[in-house]
Amino acid sequence: LPQSEIDGLDPNCRRFRLENGESLAEKDEVFGSPSTPILENPEHQTRWYFKYFLGKLHQNYVGIDSEKNPYFLSIVSQDSGSKCMPLYRVMVFRKQGAQKLALPYNPQQKLTVKQILSNFALMDASKSPKEVFSADIQKDLLLLEEQEGSVNFKFGVVYMKAGQKMDDEMLSNEYGSADFDDFLALLGEKVRLKDWERYRGGLDVKGDMTGKYSIYTLYEGHEIMFHVSTLLPFSRDNRQQVERKRHIGNDIVNIIFVDEGPNGEEPEFNPNNIKSQFTHVFAVVTKRSRKYRISVYCDETVPPFGPTLPNPPEFEDPAVFRDFLLVKLINGEKATFQTPTFARKRERTLEMLIKDLYEEYVHDNKMKHPKSQSHHYR
């Protein structure tokens, strides 16, 4: 029998690749040390509208592209008072995602909206978009930008005892060990959820419905809330621990902290024993002789992401390990958003939101027509 059937698993189960610091691909040093933690795609993930447009004088437009799909256009000018050369920053919100462009600004030869649009594919520059004057447009465009993902993060953290294999067993651990508590303290601060005002990662902050406490941190401008299995509500009557699984099973990235056995044997974690089609990255962490050790399982559809693991994949300095782990988790979620499954989901969501906003601004009373549709942008 195939090994999957022996283990009682679906023979058509998902395929994962293992990163443990030993493969040839991991040893290829392209940019510096394999263990250098660098956040990937920082400019691609920058919240342009939030950073460059919100609260600043800028123009917003709505129009229809050459494929008859609605879009929103935002334009802001960055004057010569900054350290950079004067330029236009332009965003086009479409169902495929936000397109961003920087164009040189020449006071002697200002660009029209049509000229700016001609820099984007599939734009019918013969039809001028209509300017939107309602102040509501800013919060609506922020909502569109948030659909790009990878601004704030929620990561699952599961405590696994030596010898446990299935997710029901792991999620039924009411408490963790001293090593697990030390690991949680390394990840972030323990916060009281009731009346919590910062990023909550889907947890209840009114009535303690998802536990009293959680682990939170802020890293390089990203807010991170950890869904910790032992801090989420525990049920003695529900073997599947539905409340815990509801949050952790809907996280793209999970940390599996494994307590070693009494003889220091290697943990036997199998990602296919986790019954979640949503989680794509598992970072398996153990603590051995004051060193943290890590291996990473990724769904095979997730593009490779850094930082690469050192060989052996061990860290003596907890602070160095924390930096490495957080960057690995963040990059893993960013990479997962590029998979076909998430790309299709994001496109469907954006298409629906943009169509609804188009109807709202074009057909409701939120639209005023400027006197001239071909005026120069200043």
Image (cartoon, rainbow, N blue to C red):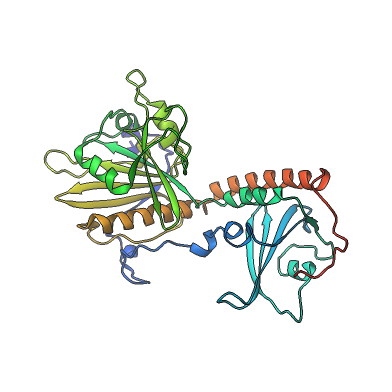
In the rendered structure, the answer to whether residue 65 lies left or right of residue 13 reads: right
Total numbered labels: 0
Residue at 38% over, 30% down:
211
Residue at 73% over, 46% down:
357
**Between 377 and 71, the one nearer to me in the picture:** 377
Residue 84 image point, x, y percent:
57, 76
Q: Residue furthest left?
A: 263
Place residue 103 in its image quadrant: bottom right
Q: Quadrant of the N terminus?
A: top left
Q: Residue furthest bottom?
A: 108
Q: Is residue 45 positioned above or below 89 on the image? A: above
Q: Does residue 2 appear in the picture of this structure?
A: no
Residue 2 image point, x, y percent:
34, 38
Residue 315 image point, x, y percent:
22, 57
In the rendered structure, the answer to whether residue 114 lies left or right of residue 217 reads: right
Place residue 363 in its image quadrant: top right
Residue 204 image point, x, y percent:
46, 32
Q: Residue furthest right?
A: 371
Q: Does residue 292 appear in the picture of this structure?
A: yes
Residue at 16% over, 43% down:
265
Q: Is residue 306 positioned above or below 30 on the image? A: above
Q: Quadrant of the C terminus?
A: bottom right
